[in-house]
Amino acid sequence: MTVKIGDTIPSMKLMMATADGPKEVSTDEIFKGKKVVLFAVPGAFTPTCSAKHLPGFVQHADELKAKGVDTIACISVNDAFVMGAWGKDQGTGDKIMMLADGAAQFTKALGLELDLNARGMGWRSQRYALVAEDGVVKQLAVEAPGGFDVSRAEAILAGL
């Protein structure tokens, strides 16, 4: 079943890169009592993700925060080392929390997995963005296959 507006973000563990190595972080920790923009990409270092999706959220981070967003997080079905390296490469600094969903468990729990096994890429995430308040999904924008329109930073900002 695919996540929808009004649903609660599932309580799960994700990983993120830190200066001391990979660290486990719970979705409860990320979402509880906060307004969060979470956007997902099919893969770190991939063309649209690196040229447009992540840079858009870095560019508009201050505007999103000005609209009451506490946390902006990027998630992908990659490991914490890859997400950390991609964040450094993209200059995310402390603007974007880079989350790793290495086994696609969170992605599958949301029903937003993307089967790219035939292309040698395994299970990935669909491209989407959501806004959650205190763990409840208030806005959800899932892209059509190959699309990049509704989940871009500007679209999410316009909906806040």
Image: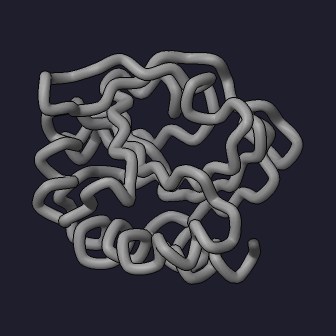
Q: Position of residue 115 (x, y in %)?
A: 41, 39
Residue lying at the far right in this picture: please name it: 6
Left or right, 87 with reference to 105:
left
Is 11 above or below relative to 145? above
Toward the viewer: 32 or 127?
Answer: 32
Left or right, 94 with reference to 69:
left
Q: Position of residue 72 (x, y in %)?
A: 50, 55
From the image, which quarter does the C terminus lie in? bottom right
Q: Position of residue 85 (x, y in %)?
A: 11, 47
Is 21 above or below relative to 113? above
In this rendering, the count of numbered labels is 0
Toward the viewer: 94 or 49?
Answer: 94
Query: In which quadrant of the rendered view does residue 64 lie?
Result: bottom right
From the image, which quarter does the N terminus lie in? top right
Query: In which quadrant of the rendered view does residue 111 lie?
Result: top right
Q: Position of residue 22 (x, y in %)?
A: 21, 22
